[in-house]
Amino acid sequence: MKQPLFESRNYKLIIAGIALIALGFILMSGGRSEDPTIFNPEIYNFRRIRLAPFLILLGLGLQVYAILSRSKSKDE
C-alpha cells in the first residue's frame, strides 16, 4: 500500500495557506472609480497597500513550510 505524500497536518497547513492567499487577493480588490477620468485615492489605503500583500506573502510562506516540513516519524 502506498504511503500518502503528506500527513493531515500538512494538508491543513496547505489549505490554511490557500485561504490566506485568497483573502489577500480579495482584500486587494476594489477601489475602482465609477468615472474613469476621476482619480480615486481609495486605491492607496492601508488594506490594499500593506495588509493584502502581507497576507499573500504569509500564505506563500505557509505553503512552503507545509510542503517542506517533515512529520516526526515513530521509526526515527
Image (cartoon, rainbow, N blue to C red):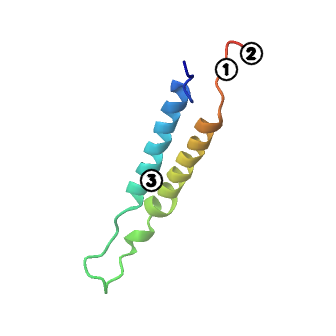
Q: Amino acid at mark 3?
A: Gly
Residue identifier under label 1:
72
Camera-side residue of 34 and 75: 75
Residue at 50 percent of width and 42 percent of height: 17
Residue 76 numbered tag: 2
Residue 24 numbered tag: 3
Find the residue positioned furthest to the front. 1
Q: Report the number of numbered marks.
A: 3
Residue at 45 percent of width and 53 percent of height: 24
Closest to the camera, between mark 3 and mark 2, is 2
- Please give left or right for residue 58 compared with residue 42 in the image: right
User: How far is disc 3 from disc 2 in space, using C-alphas?
Assistant: 39 Å
Camera-side residue of 49 and 68: 68
The mark that comes first in sequence, 3 or 2, is 3
Report which quarter residue 37 is drawn in: bottom left
Looking at the rendered image, the quarter that the C terminus falls into is: top right
